[in-house]
Amino acid sequence: MCGIVGYVGPRDCSDVLVSALTKLEYRGYDSAGIAVFENGKIEVAKSKGRLSDLVEKMKKEGKPQGHAGIGHTRWATHGEPSDVNSHPHSGRRVTIVHNGIIENYKDIKQFLIENDRTEFLSDTDTEVVAQLLDFYYDGNPIRCIRKVLHEIRGSFALGIVFADRPETVYAVRCESPLIVGQGKGEAFIASDVPAIIKYTKDYYLLEYGEIAVLKNGSVSFCDFHGRMVEKELKTADWDEDSAEKGGYPHFMIKEIHEQPTAVKTTITPRIENGLPDLSECGITPETLKSFNNIFIVACGTAMHAGMVGKYVIEKLARVSVTVDIASEFRYRDPLIGENDLVIIISQSGETADSKAVLNLVKGTKAKTLAIVNVKGSSIAREADMVIYTHAGPEIAVASTKAYMVQLAVMYLLAFEMAYAKGRIDEEKCRQLTGELVKMPEVIEKTINSISTVCQFISTQLITADSLLYIGRGLDYALSMEGSLKLKEISYIHSESYAAGELKHGTISLITDGMPVIAVATQNSLLEKTVSNIKEVKARGAMTIVICDEKAEIDRDAADYMVRIPKISQTLMPMVATVPMQLLAYYTSVNKGNDVDKPRNLAKSVTVE
Ligand code: AGP
């Protein structure tokens, strides 16, 4: 997703903007630029490509010298990646950076052209907003911004500078997240906390419809109606190191290794006297007991965590659970009513499709529960209840530790709900919770024991054009995540498939040497899964089996095996996740891909 930054203060603004933008690179982008007040004029430097290309360009053409300005990394939505389409964009007296989408930009552009504003240089919706701001600008920035905000539609955040308001930066938030950092004698705007954590941990969350004015290192706020707003100053509970690689070659492998700590930090405050206790999230056994039907709605990896949650909650709590992709759920006119619980899972808490579901459900009698990693994010703040995962900042676009802690929360929820509903007794609940408490250690042991074999197997995958990930039951739910993890960073086409369903058509795809990765951790289904493995192997597939260390699998069934520690069937997904992550990681590394910032992808998809 695009990244916005801004600065007002005593430092070299260009350096601050570029430094802050580098901390947003994980969001994915294809061009970058800055606009800085220099000697009372707005100087713009921007280019297609990486931030390093922008820095090189400024070295050649001169770096804007000043102490106030805005910056941007662009993830193209309207108009191809190019110098001219990169941000910032300007009118005659106004320059802006933008994250999100302006849905009615064509109508606005037509209006401007009809009013003799025809000097458009780019194909972007952003430039249209800059020109509209300029069209209405009468010397009063707030009035001008408010007027424009009543005319544009879409999800967006803006950083704005007015040529006749030197050393002042304006910020506006609609849907796309934006924070305002407060340092000593300096102030910042940014799409996310990592951008400013080097300078300050103190920040304000800009709410929907609020405008911030940064001047002389201090900040003031008003709402769409121009009324002044007092805001609570928050403090980030992690530091710059947490968001750095810490000696690892990539954020993704660092975050895989952080999983034991992430799980421990997430579950410990939610376990009291050996039993799950979600009361710190405002969720009591009575609350959980009241739900007869659960919808889990999310996108991508978060949805896959929901799939595992479905199997576990239905098996233990005997409550019906349906799992939907957010972008589909909102259009299927779901039957949601009283005593229903809608769980929105989201690492970023800003995914537009998931947020849209929250808005849809708010009009019903159902309750909403957000399972979110980013504190204070939109989904977290708008849900009835929230369980924060404590994975820390997840920088790699491919989610790993966030998925793992989402699984952990699914288990806590399932155990407490099953116990509250009398489906399991205290002894069983205590036993399951005790196993969950051991998971950090088991995950650590798994990472250390299988990294080498995963590294080797990945060398057998890199030439594949396409592969299948298969499994049954919980293993099928897991295979969905294994498939996404692999394809999103290795660029090898991959599809997850219910192992038992292969024979109904898809097995026709099997060709000589085609990799088929089978997740086979559910002993109760092992025999059938092994039959499916043999079926594909008999047709030429190269079979890779992920199973527990005691699973009895014919050697002729598997070309390669990844054996993982054996724990209770219910919790095996948290262990089997590790080889899937490592296979994806090493395959991507071996293919020489940009592991942390895979092509076309963004860390948080804040557009629908
Ligand atoms: C996961 O590896 C992907 N980056 C992507 O599928 C992600 O899980 C999805 O976009 C949902 O994001 P969220 O959890 O922040 O809502």
Image (cartoon, rainbow, N blue to C red):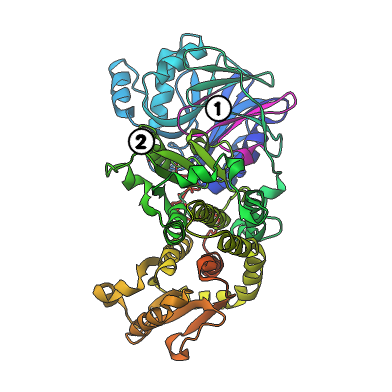
Q: Is mark 2 within 8 Å of ligand 1?
A: no
Could you say which disc has been placed on residue 298 in the image?
none
Which span is picked out in magenta?
Answer: 171-196
Task: Look at the numbered disc 1 and give the secondary structure of its residue.
Answer: loop
Who comes first in sequence, dot 1 or dot 2?
1
Amino acid under label 2?
Leu
User: Mark 1, residues whose alpha carbon is within 10 Å: few (<14), some, or many (≥20)?
Assistant: many
Task: Look at the numbered disc 2 and give the secondary structure of its residue.
Answer: helix
Position of residue 334 in the picture relative to residue 246 (left or right): left
Where does residue 239 sit, x and y in percent of width and height? 71, 43
Could you say which disc has been placed on residue 360 in the image?
2
Foreground disc of the pair 1, 2: 2
Amino acid under label 1?
Leu
Position of residue 241 in the picture relative to residue 536 (left or right): right
Where does residue 91 sit, x and y in percent of width and height? 44, 22
Please name the residue that numbered disc 1 is placed on.
206
Where does residue 22 sit, x and y in percent of width and height? 61, 44
- Looking at the image, which is closer to me, 40 or 250? 250
- Looking at the image, which is closer to me, 174 or 505? 505
Rendered view: 565 above or below 415 = below
In three-dimensional space, the C-alpha distance between marks 1 and 2, rounded to whole angstroms, equals 23 Å
Q: Residue 84: say if magenta.
A: no
Where does residue 120 sit, x and y in percent of width and height? 37, 27
- The answer to whether residue 55 shows anywhere in this view is no
- The answer to whether residue 85 shows anywhere in this view is yes
